[in-house]
Image (spheres, grey):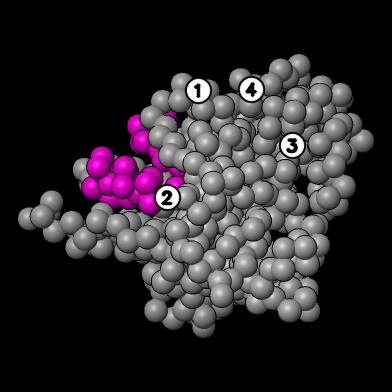
Amino acid sequence: MGETVLIMGAAGRDFHNFNTCFRDDPHYRVVAFTAAQIPGIAGRFYPPELAGRLYPRGIPIHPEERLVALIREEKVNVVAFAYSDIPHIEVMHRASRVLALGADFLLLGGHRTLLPSIRPVVAICGVRTGCGKSPTTREVVRILQAMGIKSVVVRHPMPYGDLRLQRLQRFATAADLDDQKCTIEEREEYEPLLAMGVVVYAGIDYRAILDEAETEAEVIVWDGGNNDLPFFAPDIHIVLCDPHRTGDELTYYPGESNLLSADIVIIPKVDSAPAAEVARLERTVAATNPEALLVLAELPLAVSCSESIRGKRVLAIEDGPTLTHGGMSFGAATLAARRWGAAIIVDPRPFAVGSLAETFRTYPHLVGILPAMGYSPRQLADLEKTIAGIDCDLILSATPIRLGHLIRVRQPLLEVSYRYRDHRSPTLENLLRPRLKGLLPGKFL
């Protein structure tokens, strides 16, 4: 008799695990997905066009709050856990709930979910959301460009719209972002790479995405999301640990697995983190993965007209996922406000409306910062209304996109940017160049 399966997810890893392990296997009957972390992604269907021949009516996606009821109603005997950036203890709380109902609790490993590529794959992953993966990905792309290697970036999924239209997405120009109705989170990841002249792929069906990406690249760069494991089997696995959250590298799922499997570990933010925490993290990396090569890096801030910050009442807008399920209580905008002498950082909570007010209730650690939430047009409108009601002299926006192009902002706005910079030798380029040459011997005869 086959297994009745429920997949716990967040519109990303869950779909990939279904595609690679369950979709065409008649031994399994997947009756539902549950959704967490991302606002507004429950209440949809994984459509039959993606679910395959065994699921002509598609698969419903329910809120995770219905987990227990669904296990009972559907007589589920396997629950596959498939999302990331969650404390180990919370994973086990969910496992305990499932086991108490008599079902198995399943964590899928790489032998079933990592897709092999005919091209070399460089994967950039982290131990938590907001470690600095995006600027590191851009640095890897820069190194590849300097070596004359053609690459494309494949991004961890963010399919929050019409799933049927997001099976395979290719972005080559800024117009593609508008055509495919990208959210703020997607634009934050894609826009800086497109500005470098790099094609970006994303979507849902990563076998089809990989097949397409291989046709136009010599090297595939996997740009991970949250602290998830890569979807492609990496030839070089780069993992970032955050010295502002020392200890999390061993206590969050599946970030610890990333650390244990890393070829190169980067400790970024050494220019803003306490030296004692950097040293502590170095010791942890050496004890946990002694074979990994270690790089120290900085993420220096840049603000045009930084002198205009001094003495101002500032609203700090930060990257949304880093603050929410990433758990950070500050970001680059906050650091810039402090560094360049803002008189006060205005607390946005009393002015939050709609879904933004709900975000603050869900994440009570968000004090004095505004996450750039924009997973849907409604949420983008709530963000605009929230900002409009805040009495401040200046907005510091540390989202990588040009926020003023997406919403109307009446207050003066300064963009805070940051980039990857090696702190000392060995540099990331020192370590990557010989490995890349070894992976492409015919190119460097």
The reply to whether callout 4 and callout 1 are in contact (CB within 8 Å) is no
Callout 4 crowding tier (Cα within 10 Å): few <14, some 14–19, many ≥20: some
The residue tagged 2 is 206
Q: Is residue 406 above or below residue 441?
A: above
Going from N to C along the chain, the mark reached first, 2 or 1, is 1
The residue tagged 1 is 179
Residue 404 in the image, given as x and y percentages of width and height:
65, 21
Mark 2: amino acid? Tyr
**Looking at the rendering, which quadrant does residue 232 occupy?**
bottom left
Left or right side of 34 for 82: left
Callout 2 crowding tier (Cα within 10 Å): few <14, some 14–19, many ≥20: many
Tag 3, which secondary structure? strand
Going from N to C along the chain, the mark reached first, 4 or 1, is 1
Q: Residue at x 24, y 56 (%)?
A: 118
Q: Residue at x 48, y 64 (%)?
A: 26
Going from N to C along the chain, the mark reached first, 3 or 4, is 3
Residue 340 in the image, given as x and y percentages of width and height:
69, 37
Going from N to C along the chain, the mark reached first, 1 or 3, is 1
Left or right side of 57 for 148: left
The reply to whether callout 3 and callout 4 are in contact (CB within 8 Å) is no
Part of the protein shown in magenta: 195-220
